[in-house]
Amino acid sequence: MQGRNIILGVSGSIAAYKVVQVARDLTQHGARVDVLMTEGATRFVTPLTFQTLTRRSVITDLWQDWTEDAQGHISLGEEADIMLVAPASAQTLARLALGLADDMVSLTALATYAPLVLAPAMNYHMWEHPATREHVRTLQDRGATVLTPGRGRLASGAVGEGRLAAPAEIVGAVRWRLGRSGKLAGKRVVVTAGGTREALDPVRYLTNGSSGRMGYALAQAAIDAGADVTLVSANVELSPPWGATLVPVTAATEMFAATEQACKHADVLVMAAAVSDYRPENPSDSKLTKTGGAMEFRLVENPDIVASISRPGLLKVGFAAETENLIENAHAKLERKGLALIVANDAEATIGAPNAALTLLYGGDRVEELGMLPKEEAAERVISAVARLLGA
Ligand SMILES: Cc1cc2nc3c(=O)[nH]c(=O)nc-3n(C[C@H](O)[C@H](O)[C@H](O)COP(=O)(O)O)c2cc1C
């Protein structure tokens, strides 16, 4: 989002106070956020609140100065990378659908080619009304991204669908939309994440300390680059990036089936999950109890997912988390599993940690050291390497 120009149109809904957080988050991500408010919006939150957080003038009045100094406000629409309307009231949705232009929000929406993201919030009768449904459909048909409001207790006390999407979701949708024209636009990327669980009995399992953070960061980086992402996720407690298709799995065999299915039409497989090499051969159907002595389990090997999935045109990226002979072992895996790229890292230092020191090994002995980076940044570097390998 660094350096991107975002117009945030705020309209008259009680949920306007939640959008203060959105303005703050977008600004902190490095975007230039220009806030426009309907007269109704100013009844709920003051322009000063948004101005303080974005450090930019907030425009509320269509009839204010149109001098060169005041930057003839139509130019905001010309410079915008994206326009977000949040909360989008029923009234504002109607204006946008009909192409009305009698306030700064609707006027600017009409005067920009920037993609539109809408986060509606209203009473559930208003949301379900055929007029609102039709306006939403019209806007979607024109290419707007509309976040489905949540279900829950509304400001009126009634329970129904109409709650503004969570600020993190709104920021995620903006991020997704901004990425659409990126280097991986039109590419389908499958990312696996998390650590598999291999059942010993219905309540106990063998697993590892993977947090899923690396895989989720890779999925987000691929979305930022415009890819359509399927995230095969094993036992991760993080929120998936907005726009990813999430396939939750538990054990390695489930991950294999889900990944194989997702790869049928994919261009790239990034295998970041920590998959258990072995599983108990005969897990107990009922909870095991103490026997007063040692207990033995026979383990059988799990399928090697990344090695087993192979399709012409599928570019495979593996991860090698090792505790010794990192580069030699990673190199051997690269060749044995038919990978275009393997990301080597020190297992003990990386699993579950916020940072990672990654080494990228390509075919033909090419090696690239990334050094210690936050996983989010490391993920961007890996996805850039993938884009280069695809010739994007
Ligand atoms: C207390 C209060 C809360 C309101 N909350 C909403 C709301 O959540 N969603 C909505 O569409 N309208 C809501 N309205 C009605 C709008 O503010 C009203 O339709 C207004 O004309 C919207 O115009 P605007 O889109 O130009 O801001 C509320 C009105 C009041 C008085």
Image (cartoon, grey):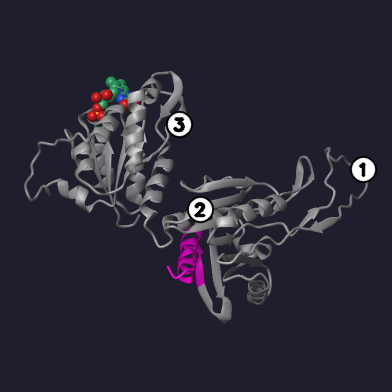
Picture quadrant of ligand 1: top left
Farthest bottom residue? 365
Q: Quadrant of residue 143?
A: top left
The question of residue 381 being in magenta is answered with yes
Reading the image, the residue beneath label 2 is 229
The numbered mark, 3 or 1, whose residue comes first in the sequence reads: 3
Three-letter code, disc 2: Val
Residue nearest the viewer, comparing 144 with 103? 144
| Mark 1 residue element | loop
Three-letter code, disc 1: Thr
The numbered mark, 2 or 1, whose residue comes first in the sequence reads: 2
Secondary structure mostly seen in magenta is helix
Q: Which residues are magenta?
A: 370-392
In this rendering, the label closer to the viewer, 2 or 1: 2
The question of residue 139 being in magenta is answered with no
Q: Quadrant of residue 157?
A: top left
